[in-house]
Amino acid sequence: MNTSTQIQRVNSLTYADVAGLNVGLTRMQGEDSVAFLERCYLATTCRQDSTYEGEQDQVCLQLGLNQWAGIAVSSTSPSMTITVCIGLVTVVLNGVTYTIPTVTMAPDDYWVWRKISDVVNDLNAITGVTATLLGPDGPALQIAKQSNQFTVPCEAITMTDQMLAHANVIESSLTFSVAPGSYVFNPQTGELIFSGTLPSGLSVAYQYTAMPYNIVCSELGLFGLVEPSLATVGVSSDNVLAYQLREVVQAVMNADPSYWAQ
């Protein structure tokens, strides 16, 4: 006879678990069906590849961590680029580059993260840029690595006068699968006009900028020790690594002895 007065919460199988099998998810301990189905739905819209975004999406899905649109950014110039890396937000507008730190170095070489709202204020200080805080404020560590510059690897060309799927195209990035002959291109609208007969199987790869753009924030931060921005934000003026980076390096070296040197 069971005399335990404690009722332990356990998972039970439902049709939600069958749906999870199709997207590679299993329920976490104590997760109810409603919450699990929400994660399954997110899995159908998240990236599932080996890119940084794909890794971030999948780890957040597996651990049940949140991602959200944190900052809305717009500009008077649709060609403005904004790039977020560890410790820095970089904006290029009309040929001028602006760098906004998301972290500062304390006198004891300790990383101190600025607020997301501080980054919003710095963005608004750039002439021609408007930024709005969309989600909760918090450490700018939550701003995920990203860029509003995207790559389209292979878009089919089927008409002599065709609008590409995206506007604000970086004209120098335009690459055709075969020589298309003479053409006229409008990078602002993405319109391509060819003067002759289209070659069979013609496609084009290109890059474009998304503007306006929502900067994504996340409860998970991923970065590698070879991240280029660490040389700028991870080293103090007296050439000492930030305390947090030293802890990371120590943990990596303990886990993998191949990092040790004579």
Image (cartoon, rainbow, N blue to C red):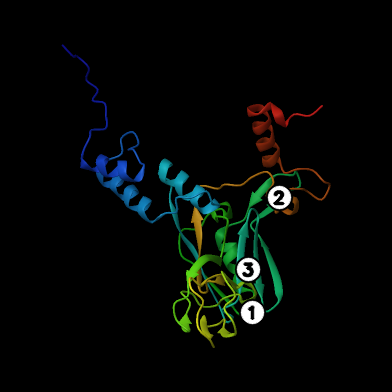
**Mark 3 → mark 1, Cα distance in angstroms:** 11 Å
* Residue that lies at the very extreme toward the right in this rendered image: 238
Q: Quadrant of residue 123?
A: bottom right
Q: Earlier in the sequence, mark 3 or mark 1?
A: 3
Relative to residue 27, is residue 78 depicted above or below?
below
Q: What is the C-alpha distance between the residues marked 1 and 2?
A: 28 Å
Which marked residue is nearer to the observer: mark 1 or mark 2? 2
Q: Amino acid at mark 2?
A: Leu
Q: Which residue is mark 3?
A: 122
Taking depth in this image into account, of 204 and 172 the one nearest to the observer is 204
Q: Which residue is mark 2?
A: 230
Residue 103 lies in quadrant:
bottom right
Q: Nearer the viewer, residue 155 or 44?
A: 155
Residue at image location 66% in from the left, 72% down from the top: 92
Task: From the top left corner, tell me how far across and down residue 65 is, in percent.
Answer: 43, 46
Q: Is residue 176 left or right of residue 1?
A: right
Q: Residue furthest left?
A: 1
Quadrant where the N terminus is found in the figure:
top left
Badge 2 density bin: few <14, some 14–19, many ≥20, Cα 10 Å:
some
**Quarter that holds the C terminus:** top right
Type of amino acid under label 3: Asp
